[in-house]
Image (cartoon, rainbow, N blue to C red):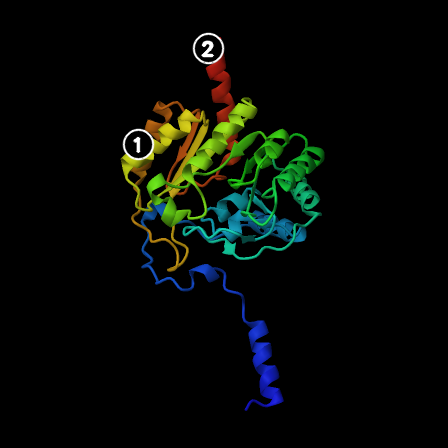
Amino acid sequence: MLTAGQSISNAMSDIQKPRPRHPEKAHKPDNPVQTCKPAWIRVKAPVSRAYHETRQIVRDHKLNTVCEEAACPNIGECWAKKHATMMIMGEICTRACSFCNVATGRPNALDPFEPTNVAQAVAKLGLEHVVITSVDRDDLDDGGAAHFAEVITAIREASPETTIEVLTPDFLRKEGALEVVVAARPDVFNHNLETVPRLYGEVRPGARYFHSLRLLDRVKQIDSSLFTKSGLMVGLGEGREEVLQVMDDLRSADVDFLTIGQYLQPTPKHHVLDRFVTPDEFKDYEKRAFGKGFLMVSASPLTRSSYHAGEDFLRLRAAREAKLAAAG
């Protein structure tokens, strides 16, 4: 029989145990992790003063960033330039994608002060372009669409010159949610397909490939002036022809901007890394994508949805203006 002291000790031990980051993956067998990375995928540890200043601003405004939560390899470079991708609606996702390092579970209530805090941070960082993403919030009636709109509005008021890019969930079974976000008029609407249709059951089990594709198509139907963008990871086991088919699917939805980057396996419980795609293969994908009519393409091992997003937005806008001038 346990003594009272032992019971209290055991209870305290239970309280102090950290919640597993990926409880839904705990039962899965470990996949091998390739610890030896090729030279083209290695990055330097973040040490700059500007990096720490950016980190402090994020902390002061109690914000989450996808840079940290998704363990982005570019955090040192981006934060040194005071570029941070804000992740709204908490740090816990309702989905369990096999590639993603964001924690899964039951999210907390939305923070009503978050739109203001995000807007203040954007102004303090002096961002010319900001990317706002989020966890999936299947627990909310609108999937968080109204919250996205509030954040966009708050940034417009606090930093009117800043261009805004949103990277949204798929709003699966959330009628009218997409329209709410589009009505707030971000400059770029991004939703990532992530991988080829064949791998969706393994990689994005809670999502539907053709729903995501229709979402992007619907944005242009609602407001053709908005730029649309989507991204793919490679190295998950996809074939080259499958990637080219996804490019065709995205162009059929009139998507303007495509990003392609290398998948990196966060833990042994995550989807196994099939292979490291070479820089020459990325260059070929970029060439083929431009040939299919995308206005802007970013394809490299370290490419992520928000990597160099500000510079790429300027190129994207210039490409559209050149296309319109040539047509006129």
Q: Secondary structure at mark 2?
A: helix
Q: Tell me if residue 10 comes above or below residue 111 in the rendering.
A: below
Would you say residue 263 is visible in this rendering?
no
Rounded to the nearest angstrom, the CA distance separating label 1 from label 2 is 27 Å
Please tell me which residue lies in front, 281 or 202: 202
What amino acid does circle 1 point to?
Answer: Asp
Please tell me which residue lies in front, 266 or 222: 222
Q: Tell me if residue 328 comes above or below residue 284 in the rendering.
A: above
Q: Secondary structure at mark 1?
A: helix
Q: Residues within 10 Å of mark 2 (few under 14, many from 20)?
A: few
Task: Tell me where residue 31 appears, x and y as whole percent.
Answer: 33, 59
- Quarter where residue 326 is shown: top left
**Rendered image: mark on residue 284:** 1
Q: Tell me if residue 319 comes above or below residue 277 in the rendering.
A: above
Residue shown at 36%/53% (left/top)? Answer: 271
Q: Which residue is mark 2?
A: 327
Q: How many marks?
A: 2
Please tell me which residue lies in front, 221 or 122: 221
Please tell me which residue lies in front, 71 or 25: 25
Residue shown at 67%/36% (left/top)? Answer: 155
Residue shown at 38%/62% (left/top)? Answer: 28
What amino acid does circle 2 point to?
Answer: Ala
Q: Residues within 10 Å of mark 1 (few under 14, many from 20)?
A: few
Is 150 positioned to the left or the right of 259 in the image?
Answer: right
**Rendered image: mark on residue 304:** none
Task: Tell me where residue 183 appears, x and y as whole percent.
Answer: 63, 29
